[in-house]
Amino acid sequence: MLKKVILALLLVIALPFIIALFIPKSYHVERHVVIERPVEPVFSYIKHLKNQGNYSRWDQMDPNMQKTYKGEDGTVGFVSTWRSDDPEVGAGEQEIIKIDENKRIDFELRFIEPFQSTDPAYMTTESVSGGTKVAWGFQGNMDYPINLMLLVMDFEQVLGNDLQVGLENLKEILEAPTN
C-alpha cells in the first residue's frame, strides 16, 4: 500500500513536468489600430522611444518610474532604460535594433526584474484607406518548465489588451487637432 501511495505521489509531482514537455515555449501577440493621419507623421512619432511614455500602458502604470536614455532617440542603437517599484512594471531596457523608415521599427526588450528575459518587439505602419494602420507586436519565450504558465495564463489576452490600450492612446494623441 505504501508503494502505491509513493508512486501516486511521484506521478502527481511529475505530471506537470511531463505536460510542460508538450506545451509551446513561445507566444506571439499583435494588435493594430487605424490612425487617421498619413504614414510619415505617424511613423516619425512612434520611432521615438521617448514618445512611448505618452501612450504605452506600461509607462502609465507608474508615473514615478525612473527612466534614462542613451544615444539619439529615433535611431538604431538608442536605449531607453526603466526602473519601477511596481512589480508589474519592474526594470529593464528597450533598444532600437532596426528601422525600415515609414514601415517598421524593431526593438529588443531586455527585462531585468521581476524576471530576466530578452524578447523582440516591433511596430509597423501601413498606408490604408483613411489613414495609417499601426501594428504593435511582441514575441515572448518561456523556457521549460516555466512554459507551463502558458496553460493557465492567456498571454495573448493579457499582453494584447495592454498593447491595444497603448494603440488607442496613440490614436487619440495623433488624431488630436493641432492648435
Image: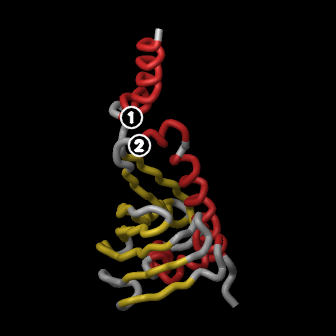
Vertical comparison of 134 with 16: above or below? below
Say few, some or many: other residues with alpha carbon within 10 Å of mark 1 (under 14 / 14 to 19 / 20 or more): some
- Given residues 167 and 13, the one toward you in this image is 13
Reading the chain from its start, which is encountered first: label 1 or label 2? 1
Vertical comparison of 27 with 11: above or below? below
Which residue is pictured at 63% across the width and 62% down the height? 165
The C terminus lies in quadrant = bottom right
Which residue is pictured at 33% across the width and 33% down the height? 21
The amino acid type of the residue labelled 2 equals Asn
Count of marks overlaid on the render:
2
Helix, strand or loop at label 2? It is: helix
Vertical comparison of 78 with 16: above or below? below
The image's mark for residue 147 is 2
Q: Position of residue 36 (x, y in %)?
A: 59, 68
Q: Is residue 70 left or right of residue 58?
A: left
Quadrant location of residue 126?
bottom left
- Residues at discs 1 and 2 in contact (Cβ within 8 Å): yes
Disc 1 to disc 2, C-alpha distance: 6 Å
Q: Is residue 76 left or right of residue 5?
A: left
Please identify the residue farthest to the front as the structure is shown: 2
Q: Position of residue 104 (x, y in %)?
A: 36, 68
Q: Which residue is mark 1?
A: 20
Helix, strand or loop at label 1? It is: helix
Which residue is pictured at 38% across the width and 42% down the height? 145
Q: Is residue 175 left or right of residue 78?
A: right
Quadrant location of residue 175?
bottom right
The amino acid type of the residue labelled 1 equals Ala
Q: Is residue 162 left or right of residue 48?
A: right
Q: Position of residue 42 (x, y in %)?
A: 50, 75
